[in-house]
Amino acid sequence: MARKGKIEPFPELSDVARAEVKTWLKSSREQIPDFVADALNLSLMVADRLGSTEVSNRGLLTQLRRALGIIPSSERRRPSGDPKSGLPAQKPKKKKQPLAALLDDLARSNRLANWYRKLAREHAKKIKKLEGRILTLNNDKDEPWTETDEAELAAEQAASEGRLVLGNRCDLDCARSAESLMTGSAVTVQTEDMISRVDRDSLPRNSVVTQQFFEDRERINFSFNVTKINIEVEKLAITTPAGPTLVSASTEDIGPPKSKVTWEFLASMVVLVAQYALPLNRFAALASSPVKTFKSSEISRHFQYVASRCSAIYLQLAKDLARSEVLMGDDTSSRVIELTKAIKLRAVDPESAAPWAKYATKDKATDTIEKLRKSGKAPEIGVKLAAALGFECDRKDGSGAKVGFNTSVISGRSDIHDPKSQIVFFRSHLGGFGNILSVILHQRPADLRNIVIQSDLATVNLISDPVLRDKLHIVQVGCAYHARRPFAIFEDQDPELCQWILHEFKGLAIFEGALDVTGRNSENTEAVRTNDEREIWERIKQYAGIIARKWSAASDLGVAARYIIRHYERLTYYQKDHRLDISNNFSERMLRLERLIENNALFRQTLNGRFCLDIIRTILQTAIAAKVDLQLYIMWVLSMPPEVVDADPAAFTPIAFARLKCSFHAWSCGSPLPIALASMHC
């Protein structure tokens, strides 16, 4: 008997022994039960494979693991990764002139395209053999690469490079949305000039200076400073026909009334909290000093004040977004303590009133505003937003209101020819992307009938409103990389086929990247997409068909393959419209910060706090797209009288600020101009 804990080695089965077993099995086949004969045949096949020197044992091991459902932890892949993952990174190089750097990028794009084509051809040869026998353990040798293959590959590459250089300019209509989540424009850069001189006393004795010159160097300094501003407010005692009175100088050019902070403080606060995910209590600790100690509740009031001042601009951006010709978006779940408690309470007591009952729908929000107006009270932010956008959405089956709380993002250009007019709109509500999109599209002018919407093709993201379906001609477009993702996540289930189909998606990313390098215009974008990328999609569809026949509709890979086949036209529609991107990754990047904020702050206490975050995030991310200084823009809006902004919010959007020829002329109406704005040059 073997000792406990010791694993005995497997006995070896020689070629002679295997031959004897096969002979005995053949002669005794009638006396052996079928399941025993099958088991012995499989065992002999495995033994033959293990003894073969021509076939890699790794492939057999993968097959066995797949059959037994065993996936080593080192091979489990959950993140889908980038479509270009696995490509060799560019070697760090010295800074070159723009033209030289562009030529290097073009050369690399051509090398990647050539590498993709060669490997795709090898996959195509293998797929011809695989189509007739999907489930097999045989592994034929690869066909050699011939001179004919090389010539055909060179011809294809030359034709592809010719398509890339079509057109004579970069077209802003084709520019991709690529603004960052966090931007350095939030930091005001100040330049100081200093002179560092040689200590003459340290020079050797009897030395003579024969020449003096200076070398330019740079140092970057970063620090947190709290500035205490002492203001002597002039007051005049005057006598008027109505009697004596006291007149004080205004400090509205420095900060909000009845507050100890400045406009610049508020601008820095919202950028750090909403754009850099800094929790309120941490910002309060950061801003506190022996001069002034802040509490998170105080910072929260300041945050809500800024959101309230920007709410009219937020709603104006929703109207401008309704005019866009191309919209894209997505949503993600969100958490608010007030809402979670209310939903749990309603499960126990259905008659309990929800905190959002007064603004659950547009009509209820409007009625609430009228009642508050009569009593002389101002409505909360949630009520103001719901009056225009609603809050609680109904289920499609009519069984009641939705309970899933999501933050949706919708983006699009108010001017299709200007990338700076990109609007990034956030809205948290009881519903999904399709619901808030329907609300916004109801504001679309009747003469703008055609619209393209890009998102993942889940049913909750589709427009189902019959009024909109009749009013508008809606084209729903899919996301190529959303179709790619399952094959990357579940690659371990079928490594070979998944690697082939992932290679094709990598080819799409290579050609889209080549367009970025050469410069996009309608001519070269259409040529590359309808030729090079169309061929890639045909191979993707072919591989998806093989996977669909091999894997059931209940499996992960089976679902992914059938998704491509079912939505093939929607996934490839972008090839017909040069304004569209290949994917909806921009929307997913915009929602990524929501997770970062949630991880840092864990949750939002109240719904109004969540709405305030939506307003500020929309304003800041849209300002980043407009390429304006975030702090200066926020200061510009806050320094204006509230009634002026509310009366004409379209004049205070980020794109309006970006288009001002000179900021000083924008303030020529007589309003006080902060020093920082007066020194800004457009």
Image (cartoon, helix red, strand yellow):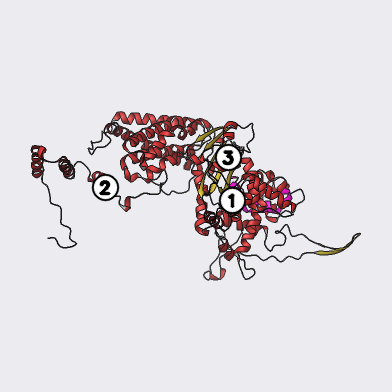
Relative vertical location of residue 287 with respect to residue 275 in this rendering, above or below: below
Q: Nearer the viewer, mark 1 or mark 3?
A: 3
Residue nearest the viewer, comparing 204 with 95: 95
Residue 190 occupies quadrant = bottom right
Number of numbered labels in the structure image: 3
Mark 1–mark 2 Cα distance, whole angstroms, equals: 48 Å
Residue 68: image tag? 2
* Residue 488 in view: yes
Does the segment drawn in magenta span residue 171? no
Residue 74: image tag? none
Q: Is mark 1 on a helix, strand or loop?
A: helix
Q: Nearer the viewer, mark 1 or mark 2?
A: 2
Mark 1 and mark 3 lie on one chain; the one further toward the N terminus is 3
Residue nearest the viewer, comparing 207 with 223: 223
Q: What stretch is highlighted in magenta?
A: 616-644
Q: Mark 1 points at which residue?
A: 614
Q: Is mark 2 on a helix, strand or loop?
A: helix
Does the segment drawn in magenta span residue 639? yes
Residue 2 occupies quadrant = bottom left
Left or right: residue 267 versus residue 234 is: left
Quadrant in the picture for the N terminus: bottom left
Q: Please state which amino acid type lies under the numbered disc 1.
A: Asp
Mark 2 and mark 3 lie on one chain; the one further toward the N terminus is 2
Residue 438: image tag? 3
Mark 2 and mark 1 in contact (Cβ < 8 Å)? no
Residue at image location 25% in from the left, 35% down from the top: 142
Left or right: residue 17 versus residue 680 is: left
Q: Is mark 3 on a helix, strand or loop?
A: helix
Q: Please state which amino acid type lies under the numbered disc 2.
A: Leu
Percent position (x, y) of residue 166?
49, 30
Q: Main secondary structure of the magenta part?
A: helix
Mark 1–mark 3 Cα distance, whole angstroms, equals: 18 Å
